[in-house]
Amino acid sequence: MLRTVKDYTSTEGKPNWCPGCGDFGIEMAMKQAMAQLDLDPDKVLLISGIGCGANMPNWFSTYGFITLHGRALPVATGAHLASHELSVFVEAGDGDAYGIGMGHFIHAMRRNPNMVYIVGNNTVYGLTLGQISPTAAKGCKGPSTPFGNPDLPVNPIALALANHCSFVGRGYAGNLPHLINLIKAAHQHKGFALVDVLQPCVTYAKDVGYKYYQDLTYDLQEAGHDKTNLEAAMKRAFEVPEKYPIGIFYQEERPLYEEELPQFKKGPLVSHDISNVDITPIFEEYSS
Amino acid sequence: MKINELNFMIGGKAGEGIEVPGNMFAKLCMKAGLWLNATREFYSVIKGYNNINQIRVAEQPVKSHINRYDLILAIDDETVPRYYKDVVPGGGIIYDPSLVSASSVQSEVRPGGALVYDATLMKEALSREDINYFPVPMSDLAMEKVGLKLAKNIVGIGATLALLDYNVQPLLDLIVKTFARKGDDVVNKNIDAAQAGYNYAREKFSREFNYQLRNVKNPVKKFFADGNEVMVFGAIKSGLKFVSEYPMTPSSSILHTTAKYAQKYNISVNHVEDELSAMNMAVGAGFAGARSLVATSGGGFALMTEAVGMAGMIEAPVVCIECQRPGPSSGLPTRSGQGDLRQVMHASQGEFPRIVMAPGHHEEAFYMVHEAFNLAERYQCPVFIISEKYLSEGYATLPYLKTDHLRVDRGKLLKESEIRAGYKRYQITADGIPPRAIPGQKGGAHLANTYEHLESGYSTEEVGHVTAMYERRMKKIELIEKNLPAAELEGNPKADFTIVCWGGTYMPASEAMDMLNRDGVKTNLLHVKYMLPFQPGVREILEHCKRPVLVEGNYTGLLGGVIAEKAGIDIRSRILDYSGRPFTPDKIYEEIKKLTKK
Ligand SMILES: Cc1ncc(C[n+]2csc(CCOP(=O)(O)OP(=O)(O)O)c2C)c(N)n1
Ligand code: SF4
Ligand SMILES: [Mg+2]
């Protein structure tokens, strides 16, 4: 019997996002992807930061962890290394990922732990009532920038390409079939997979809503993009804001962090017997 | 003649390698069956500046370092003028006449570190009548025998052994062992250097010195390690599986030592991007079921603060060792102090159960770290061990520590077979501790949530639910407190003075107590080990003390404040030191002697 969205859905309550919020699309795409991949909900760990989108684990029936603003990645890395056979999904907002948690993002890409990093890119801080996020265009107005955003936006795709990210993808919350496939591909990828999702915030980022992305997004794979070509990927990354390519920009096979260390060969660390560790050899070593 | 009782010090410039000879000397003493305590004082500078390595040996366990030296080996120009006054009558100084002479002057003045000395000072430094001077041309001998000036350290150690009338062979064996990896040439050169120093001192100063080292018969099996290493051993024994750390003096050797054993004991050891990451990762690993550890100093701990509260809120076990150095801010990176107590006790917003404890010496540190991992899982909360540079980087010999009685207690961690339908991770239980499932277990799926939550972990803001969960969590504090071992008074219960201290200050304080008692000043000692929850029994003990004296390595008497708050007793007599140097037994002794006259 194949699993369905219901198998990943919490019975406690329903999402409380604004009607029309792009987070619904992300939630549905994740659950569909999990179902289509037939993942055992007890083997899935969904870790999030703090924000509108990061409330996500409330509405999943898998293992979940709502952490701190910006810290989803290190928490996920720790959990993953402790128990590396779990399917780890990380959900963060663009403030989470590219603002307060930017440092962790860069180092996670270098480290290449096996997990999917889904970033709801809505150009605003939704949960704190609509300030600009690091991906907001220069000039954007918000409560913290009444005269317009003085800073240039972060380009997360280019940043990932420049930092050894082994899977660089972008989805669009308004294109569900595409996003489902992208999340599946990201999960099947061996290593750290970034899925930046263009996520309309219908309340605070009305200028970059469904209408805007509907016209400007196009499918990289349909356009014949070669995802093994870093240079071509970099070019595509800089098409914004004229065009928003979605799909896989770049994918590379690289050894996993845990694959290169013998500690992980005997199964997940949590399964090791710790009841009687013998440290006499250490005393011996320090006695001569 | 003093046999097997020696306070030895090697002084030299950073970068000249006083480490290697210090270590060799310590190992030789351990091999001879002696006990030791060793500590280093050094500047936060990689090259230049005078550093010292203090090694105190005896036939009985040595409690603390002291600053009165029996023998100094001065490798540089600065050690003699800096420390000649600290040599005990009858003691000696080995120095290099090409560096140290009555006409030496310190020409290059480096602010913030170097001692300025001139001919007058040098004359004085070299003319104490009551001590022995042993000029050994260490640099010349090193150049002559080895063609390498740096080998002067080894020449010096050779000379030291000759003066102590000890056999040179164990040193030569140790040289072979230490330098084997570097090839025969290096081994042979160092052997020549050691032999040259030994022969020189034998010929020039035979039997002039009043101290001897001898092998002890049937010695106890011992090992030699610093506090950080010992704490790592305790962690490994308790089943350590995960470490994330960002280097910061004086905690870095915890990272280095765990890294060294990572593959042998199957531990994931991670040098991560910053302390934010370190603590967040460790909480993630603890949540997922691995025994996880972070270590840092005050500055790094400040960055960990938010994640400390996360561990409290989602009830994840995690152990953090905070190795204090004096603050505020960057403070004195390579020195010792006890200024972070309140920071560790109160880090992070809101209220949640946590355990804060501080070991007094190496052996206690081993067992306390082992216990910390059990407490973290039993009470599902973060546990903090506070150490300081003096303990963390101070060395001691220890007997092979007994581990047969140690048990790994994982508290209410469920086996998969114990998980029932309708499992709730944050169930409101009678003792406050909920049953714990970890990711991957069948039927245990739940949400760990830093927002206030229902028993399932689902977010809530409803008054009834919020207060019930809050109370259930906080209830754990009572339970922890009830199960803490009560404080104990050491020494004569009817003493006139009670030393009250915490952390590594215990080591000098305990020796000071012995000194005072020998001198007729009746003194006992209260070492407070648990600060949060506050250790039971402190009030009862202090109520019966004639005159408690607080001894702490800070300005405001932080433990004193905690005692006033929790036990309602205000300790007025205080010996506080914030110089960045650890207390010596002498200092505590003298200060308490002064109190006897008041
Ligand atoms: C350390 C810290 N700083 C600030 C906040 C307040 N805060 C909560 S969510 C948020 C921004 C959320 O923006 P984003 O990550 O883009 O998520 P979104 O709400 O847009 O999904 C902020 C600033 C916090 N929770 N923690
Ligand atoms: S504020 Fe924006 S991001 Fe947040 S729930 Fe509403 S629409 Fe979604
Ligand atoms: Mg956002």
Image (spheres, rainbow, N blue to C red):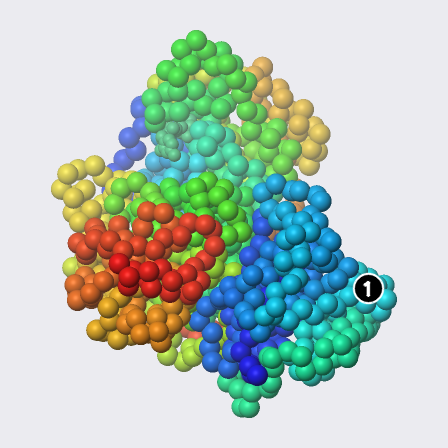
Q: Is residue A175 left or right of residue B522?
A: right
The amino acid type, in three-letter code, at marker 1 is Asp
Chain designation of label 1: B
Which of the 4 image quarters holds residue B370?
bottom left
Nearest the eye: B329 or B315? B329
Q: Furthest residue to the left? A: B464
Give the camera-side residue of A167 and B217: B217
Where is residue A264 shown, x and y percent of the image? 55, 61
Dot 1 alpha-carbon crowd within 10 angstroms: few under 14, some 14 to 19, many 20 or more? some
Quadrant containing ligand 1 reads top left
Q: Which residue is mark 1?
A: B140
Identity of the residue drawn at 70% across and 64% down: B95
The structure residue drawn at horizontal position 59% and vertical position 70%, both measured from the top left corner, is B130
Answer above or below: position of A240 versus B19: above
Residue drawn at (23%, 73%) of the image: B493
Label 1 SS? helix
Going by the image, does A126 lie left or right of B162?
left
Q: Quadrant of the image for the N terminus of chain B? A: bottom right
The spot of residue A6 in percent (x, y) is: 33, 43
Residue B73: image quadrant is bottom right
